[in-house]
Image (tube, rainbow, N blue to C red):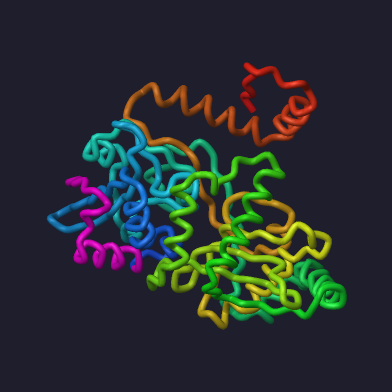
C-alpha cells in the first residue's frame, strides 16, 4: 500500500469526486462527518488538517483525514466535535493501520468515535460505546406504532406536553430548516448557558468551533450541510437544534431550549417534531450521538457501536492504552460518579487535581 499525505487545501475536484464515490460505496459511511465537505471546511478554519491517500495497485482505495495535533501525533478531523471517524473506503478494502501511520510520518492517531465495522482497528480499541439512532425509514406513524408495541409511553407523554404548552404559552409551530442567523445565535447562547450550568466546558468558547458552526450553517453541500430547526410557541422560539445532515442521516448535534420554559420540556417536543418531519425531508435516520441517556433510550430503535482508543506504532502503547481504558471505565462507573460528587462537596484547594 502506498500512502501519500497532502494538506486539506490540496484536495482537487478530482480527488473530492473520488472521495464521494468511495463514501457512497459503503453504507457504514452515511454520516455527514464522512463527507469531504466536513474536512474541507475544517481545513479552511484550521491549519493542521491533512489527508492520507491510500493507494493499491495504482488506484486510490482509501482516504483518512486527520488533524496533526503535534509533530507526530494526530486526531480526527474536527477533534472534539467529530462524532464519526474512520477510513473512507469500500467495505472490502483491507489495509494496515500501522502502514498508514508510517506513510503519514505519525507515531499515533487518537480516535473516540471510530466505526467498529473497520475491524483492522480492533486491536487498538480501548472501549466501545453505542450511538443511539432513530430509524424512521418506514415513516413516522410506523415508528410510533413500533415504540408503543415496545411498551414506550414517551411519545404519548410528549403529546400531552404539547397540548399544555399551547394552552399556557402559545400555538406550536415547527421550522425544519431555518435560515435566520439571529435565531442560530439564540440557540447557541442557550447551549453555552447549559454547558455552564452543568459544569461542562463551553464548546463555543473556542473560536474555531463557533466558526465551524457558522460556516456549516451557510453550507448546502449535498452530503453535508448545516441545518437549524426551531420550535415556536406563539411568537417566541422555545427550543432549537443545530445539526448536520447527509442525504439520509440527520445528526443530532447541538439541541437547546429556553431555560425559562424548562417545565414544558420544549426540547423533547422539538425532537418529536423532527421525527415527524424527517421522512418528509428525505431523511431516514436521526443519529442521537454517542452515549446512552434515559431520553435516548426511550426514543431509539437502533444503534451503532463506536470505539475509543489510540493507534500507535510502538510497544509502549500497550500499557498506556490499558491504563487509559481503565481510567475511563472508572470515570464513567458508579464509583467515579460517587467520587466526583464527594469532590464537589469538598473545598477546592488551588493546586488540587482530580483524576476522575
Name the chief secondary structure element in magenta: helix
In the image, farthest residue toward the front: 182
Locate residue 75, reporting x and y percent. 39, 41
Q: Residue at x 20, y 61 (%)?
A: 12
Locate residue 131, reporting x and y percent. 57, 54
Please say whether residue 178 is one of the residues in the magenta stretch: no
Please say whether residue 8 is one of the residues in the magenta stretch: yes
Locate residue 205, reporting x and y percent. 54, 45
Locate residue 332, reporting x and y percent. 66, 36
Can you say whether 278 is above or below 96 in the image?
Answer: below
Q: Nearer the viewer, residue 286 or 198?
A: 198
Can you say whether 108 is above or below 145 in the image?
Answer: above
Q: Is residue 340 visible?
A: yes
Can you say whether 150 is above or below 321 in the image?
Answer: below
- The mark tally for this picture is 0
Q: Nearer the viewer, residue 43 or 184?
A: 184
Q: Residue at x 31, y 47 (%)?
A: 49
Q: Residue at x 59, y 79 (%)?
A: 138
Residue 11 placement, left or right of 146: left
Residue range corresponding to the magenta coloring: 2-24
Q: Quadrant of residue 97?
A: top left
Amino acid at each position: 500500500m502506498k500512502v501519500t499525505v497532502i494538506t486539506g487545501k490540496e484536495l482537487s475536484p478530482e480527488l473530492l469526486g473520488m472521495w464521494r464515490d468511495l463514501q457512497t460505496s459503503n453504507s457504514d459511511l452515511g454520516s455527514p462527518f464522512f463527507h469531504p465537505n466536513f474536512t474541507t471546511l475544517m481545513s479552511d478554519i484550521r491549519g493542521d488538517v491533512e489527508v492520507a491517500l491510500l493507494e493499491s495497485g495504482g488506484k486510490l482505495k482509501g482516504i483518512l483525514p486527520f488533524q496533526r495535533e503535534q509533530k507526530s501525533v494526530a486526531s480526527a478531523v474536527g477533534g472534539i466535535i467529530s462524532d464519526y471517524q474512520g477510513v473512507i473506503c469500500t467495505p472490502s478494502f483491507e489495509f494496515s493501520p500501522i502502514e498508514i501511520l508510517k506513510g503519514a510520518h505519525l507515531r499515533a492517531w487518537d480516535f473516540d468515535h471510530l466505526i467498529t465495522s473497520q475491524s483492522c482497528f480492533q486491536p487498538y480499541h480501548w472501549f466501545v460505546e453505542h450511538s443511539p439512532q432513530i430509524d424512521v425509514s418506514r415513516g413516522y406513524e410506523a415508528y410510533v406504532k413500533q415504540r408503543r408495541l415496545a411498551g414506550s409511553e414517551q411519545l404519548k407523554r410528549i403529546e400531552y406536553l404539547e397540548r399544555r404548552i399551547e394552552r399556557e404559552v402559545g400555538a406550536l409551530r415547527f421550522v425544519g430548516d431555518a435560515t435566520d442567523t439571529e435565531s442560530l445565535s439564540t440557540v447557541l447562547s442557550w447551549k453555552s448557558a447549559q454547558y455552564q450550568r452543568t459544569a461542562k466546558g463551553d464548546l463555543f468558547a473556542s473560536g474555531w468551533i463557533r466558526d465551524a458552526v457558522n460556516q456549516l450553517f451557510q453550507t448546502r453541500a449535498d452530503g453535508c450541510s448545516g441545518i437549524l430547526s426551531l420550535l415556536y410557541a406563539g411568537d417566541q422560539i422555545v427550543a432549537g437544534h443545530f445539526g448536520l445532515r447527509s442525504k439520509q442521516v440527520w445528526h443530532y448535534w447541538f439541541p437547546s431550549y429556553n431555560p425559562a420554559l424548562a417545565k414544558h420540556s420544549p426540547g423533547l417536543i422539538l425532537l418529536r417534531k423532527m421525527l415527524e418531519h424527517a421522512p418528509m425531508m428525505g431523511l431516514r435516520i436521526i443519529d442521537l450521538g454517542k452515549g446512552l441517556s434515559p431520553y435516548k433510550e426511550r426514543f431509539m430503535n437502533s444503534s451503532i457501536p463506536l470505539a475509543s482508543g489510540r493507534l500507535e506504532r510502538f510497544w509502549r502503547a500497550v500499557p498506556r492504552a490499558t491504563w487509559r481504558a481503565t481510567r475511563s471505565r472508572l470515570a464513567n462507573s458508579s464509583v467515579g460518579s460517587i467520587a466526583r460528587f464527594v469532590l464537589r462537596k469538598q473545598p477546592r484547594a488551588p493546586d488540587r487535581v482530580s483524576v476522575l
